[in-house]
Image (spheres, grey):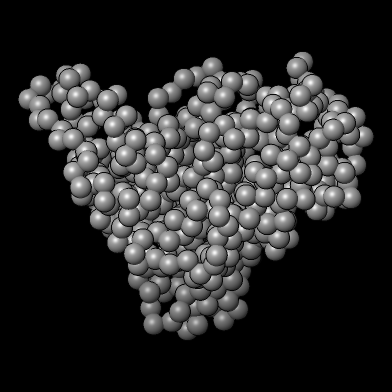
């Protein structure tokens, strides 16, 4: 049986297509040069979770975040535009599509941010190539066989696939595994439609016996090793996933839609204690490819947005009620936006830039990153120009949410985007070691900072307090004494280049490490 037949077989049954070792408690942490192992663990071993929501087909950004004061918008879309009075106000010039009350509420309570005009240089308008570029995080003229998530998670699992830990680090709710979860050593996640079905299929012997091979490092031998890893991962993780699903719960009633049912499973697994770091959910098919009869206030696009807003809103409610919202962040993405002008079929054709949405308790919500779309300065096809490169969003996730080293983020994204990363998240993980009897609480504000940052802490009876700033190579850039009695110190970061730094607070034997982001 060859690889293609094997993948086709397991794909139809919903079996896991791959697996990934879990960093937490299973991978020895390598120390940075000049920085201790505890700090390395801070940077690369948090319990934070990312939920990726794919909007396949190319979501129409102009009817999602509506520029309701721009006459060009209405002139370009005589039948599918959203009247200003029907939008849900965001700013004096922008409004949500009326079906997105769920997004409106998240934005208003400070747990959703909008990133405007997201695409990449020289965007490709093909569904297949455009999707590949987003999943692999490559330039338009670069082809890669690995995904950005897969490469990131692969840095967390140097022994994969020799060692399969207790929990997978990536899960896709679906019947096949995304290119985004593929690493250099093979697929880096598991995929299934339903935890119970996954368990039944694995334990009923649906998957074929993978033959042994004595052909070593040959194409045939590698194919057999690949299939053996997939089959083994299914055996290892089916019981683990089902156990988490059985332990988990949902505290809200989810809508009866495909997307909501997938997020319901994600919530259940998080609630059940599964230590998976990244989840991927998607609509089925090229759902957002609205070439014809797109609709305006009502219609197919409105229904899709209603499903999206309601599902994400309910998921966040569920996480909050279970006390898990602080460890979860989410992000939507689509391969491209739509053309500014509607077509002759009352729809929109493939375009370029579109808004992207980031949500979570730790997101710098209630903010618009980027300007209103410019509908007069377009490219030669009549499409929107880029406002934000999606690589900068990915860099924000890696550097700020997961507190990844800048060198690691650079290897994952093939280039250094640390200086252009958007300040999308409020804080980074904090670790405490060698704690004394006194509590050590630390907060850095503002963070990101541009000129001055205030460090607040509780050192109580400590005799000496020192604050240090290191770069990601462990070099000491700044140090100053602070008063334990005051519990507060201000540091000047105006001379530091925009980047991500490690802030260390020392109080006698207690040491607290945190992340400080400097922007301009």
Point out the residue furthest to the right here.
Answer: 71
Residue 361 sits in quarter: bottom right
Please state, as top left, top right, bottom left or bottom right, where the N terminus lies in the image: top left
Left or right of 104: which side holds 157? Answer: left
Vertical order, 289 against 157 (above or below): above
Q: How many marks?
A: 0
Tell me the residue at 85%/33% (across/down): 79
Point out the residue furthest to the left here.
Answer: 214
Tell me the residue at 38%/51% (across/down): 194
Taking depth in this image into account, of 40 and 116 the one nearest to the observer is: 116
Taking depth in this image into account, of 21 and 253 the one nearest to the observer is: 253
Vertical order, 268 against 458 (above or below): above
Instruction: Give residue 198's position: percent from left, percent from top.
Output: 31, 49
Left or right of 68: which side holds 303? Answer: left
Instruction: Give residue 137's position: percent from left, percent from top.
Output: 51, 31
Vertical order, 469 against 461 (above or below): above
Please state, as top left, top right, bottom left or bottom right, where the C terminus lies in the image: top right
Taking depth in this image into account, of 514 and 201 the one nearest to the observer is: 201
Tell me the residue at 52%/77% (across/down): 458
- Can residue 189 be seen here? The reply is no
Residue 209 sits in quarter: top left
Residue 434 sits in quarter: bottom left
- Can residue 461 be seen here? The reply is yes
Instruction: Give residue 356's position: percent from left, percent from top.
Output: 65, 42
Tell me the residue at 76%/47% (across/down): 97
Instruction: Give residue 382's position: percent from left, percent from top.
Output: 78, 20
């Amino acid at each position: 049986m060859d690889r293609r037949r094997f993948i086709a077989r397991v794909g139809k049954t919903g079996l896991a297509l791959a697996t990934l070792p879990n960093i937490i408690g299973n991978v020895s942490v390598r120390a940075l040069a000049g920085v201790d192992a505890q700090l390395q663990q801070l940077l690369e071993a948090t319990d934070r979770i990312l939920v990726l929501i794919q909007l396949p087909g190319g979501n129409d950004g102009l009817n999602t975040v509506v520029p309701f004061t721009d006459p060009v918008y209405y002139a370009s879309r005589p039948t599918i535009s959203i009247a200003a009075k029907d939008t849900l106000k965001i700013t004096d010039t922008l409004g949500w599509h009326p079906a997105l009350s769920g997004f409106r509420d998240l934005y208003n309570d400070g747990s959703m941010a909008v990133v405007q005009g997201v695409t990449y240089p020289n965007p490709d308008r093909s569904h297949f190539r455009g999707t590949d570029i987003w999943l692999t995080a490559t330039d338009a003229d670069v082809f890669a066989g690995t995904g950005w998530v897969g490469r990131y998670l692969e840095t967390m699992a140097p022994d994969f696939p020799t060692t399969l830990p207790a929990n997978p680090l990536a899960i896709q709710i679906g019947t096949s595994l995304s290119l985004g979860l593929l690493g250099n050593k093979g697929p880096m996640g598991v995929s299934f439609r339903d935890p119970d079905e996954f368990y039944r299929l694995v334990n009923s012997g649906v998957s074929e016996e993978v033959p042994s091979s004595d052909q070593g490092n040959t194409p045939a031998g590698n194919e057999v090793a690949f299939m053996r890893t997939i089959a083994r991962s299914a055996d290892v993780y089916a019981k683990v996933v089902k156990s988490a699903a059985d332990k988990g719960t949902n505290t809200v009633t989810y809508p009866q839609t495909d997307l909501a049912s997938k997020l319901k499973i994600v919530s259940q697994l998080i609630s059940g204690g599964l230590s998976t770091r990244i989840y991927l959910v998607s609509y089925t098919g090229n759902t957002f490819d609205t070439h014809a009869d797109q609709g305006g206030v009502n219609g197919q696009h409105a229904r899709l947005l209603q499903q999206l807003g309601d599902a994400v809103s309910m998921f966040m409610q569920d996480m909050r009620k279970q006390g898990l919202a602080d460890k979860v962040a989410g992000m939507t993405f689509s391969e491209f936006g739509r053309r500014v002008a509607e077509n002759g079929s009352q729809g929109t054709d493939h375009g370029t830039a579109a808004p992207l949405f980031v949500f979570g308790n730790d997101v710098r919500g209630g903010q618009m990153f980027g300007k209103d779309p410019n509908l007069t300065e377009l490219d030669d096809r009549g499409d929107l120009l880029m406002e934000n490169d999606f690589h900068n969003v990915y860099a924000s996730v890696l550097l700020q949410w997961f507190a990844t080293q800048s060198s690691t983020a650079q290897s994952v994204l093939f280039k250094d985007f640390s200086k252009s990363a958007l300040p999308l998240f409020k804080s980074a993980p904090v670790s405490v070691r060698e704690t004394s009897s006194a509590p050590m609480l630390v907060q850095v504000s503002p963070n990101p900072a541009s000129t001055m940052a205030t460090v607040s802490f509780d050192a109580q009876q400590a005799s000496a307090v020192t604050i240090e700033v290191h770069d990601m190579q462990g070099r000491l850039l700044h140090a100053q004494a602070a008063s334990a009695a005051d519990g507060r110190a201000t540091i000047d970061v105006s001379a530091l280049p925009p980047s991500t730094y490690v802030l260390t607070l020392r109080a006698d034997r207690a040491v607290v490490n945190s992340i400080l982001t400097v922007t301009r």
